[in-house]
Image (spheres, rainbow, N blue to C red):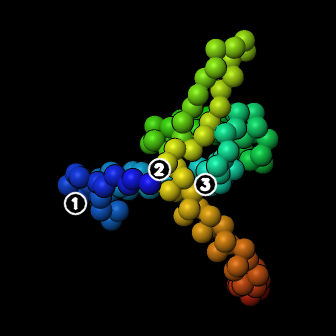
Amino acid sequence: MVTKQFSGSPEDADLRRADSLAREIFSDVANKWALLIIETLGERTLRFSELRNEVEGVSHKMLTQNLRMLERNGLAERKVYPTVPPRVEYTLTEAGQGLRATVDGMCEWTHQYLGHIEGARRRFDV
């Protein structure tokens, strides 16, 4: 796997700067729908309707917006087949697969600490 390194200014890669490109990208991908879409796609190729069925609670609009954002950022590919009606499929790119490793880690963390978090919430809420 070849990873391209950022070659712009250090300010563009600084998440602490409000005007940095890194913060813009982080803001794009650090939302529940994007993370769930990335986790759902995994190593598969899915149609829009399949994704919508698997990501419970996502609206048509939110799924469309997040898929477009993932495509714009080079994390997902959209392939349109010239059929009637058109068939559209989505798959993660190499960069999307790289982000998926982080998402998988977050999922593992959630499973590991779910009981701890539930207990903390109960104690806090009394």
Q: Label 2 near label 3: C-beta < 8 Å?
A: no
Q: Quadrant of the N terminus?
A: bottom left
Percent position of residue 87, x then y: 69, 22
Local crowd size for mark 1, using a 10 Å CA cut-off: few (<14), some (14–19), many (≥20): few
| Along the viewing direction, whichever of 111 and 63 lies nearer the viewer | 111
Percent position of residue 94, x then y: 49, 48
Residue 116 in the image: above or below residue 52: below
Mark 2 or 1, closer to the camera: 2
Q: CA distance from mark 2 to mark 1?
A: 21 Å
For the point 73% across and 15% down, the residue is 85
What numbered label is drawn on residue 35? 3
Which element carries disc 3, helix, strand or loop? helix
Q: CA distance from mark 3 to mark 1?
A: 26 Å
For the point 34% across and 52% down, the residue is 4
Please name the residue that numbered disc 2 is placed on: 95
Decide which of tag 3 and tag 2 comes sooner along the chain.
3
As shown in the figure, which amino acid type bears the numbered disc 1?
Answer: Pro
For the point 70% across and 33% down, the residue is 48
Relative placement, left or right, of 15 versus 48 is left
Instruction: Tell me, yes or no, if residue 55 can be seen here.
Output: yes
Instruction: Report which quarter residue 124 is drawn in.
Output: bottom right
Residue 100 in the image: above or below residue 61: below
Q: CA distance from mark 3 to mark 2?
A: 14 Å
Which element carries disc 1, helix, strand or loop? helix
As shown in the figure, which amino acid type bears the numbered disc 2?
Answer: Ala
Decide which of tag 2 and tag 1 comes sooner along the chain.
1
| Along the viewing direction, whichever of 95 and 14 lies nearer the viewer | 95
Please name the residue that numbered disc 1 is placed on: 10
Local crowd size for mark 3, using a 10 Å CA cut-off: few (<14), some (14–19), many (≥20): some
User: In the current view of this chain or complex, which residue is farthest to the top?
Assistant: 84
Q: Label 1 near label 3: C-beta < 8 Å?
A: no
Decide which of tag 3 and tag 1 comes sooner along the chain.
1
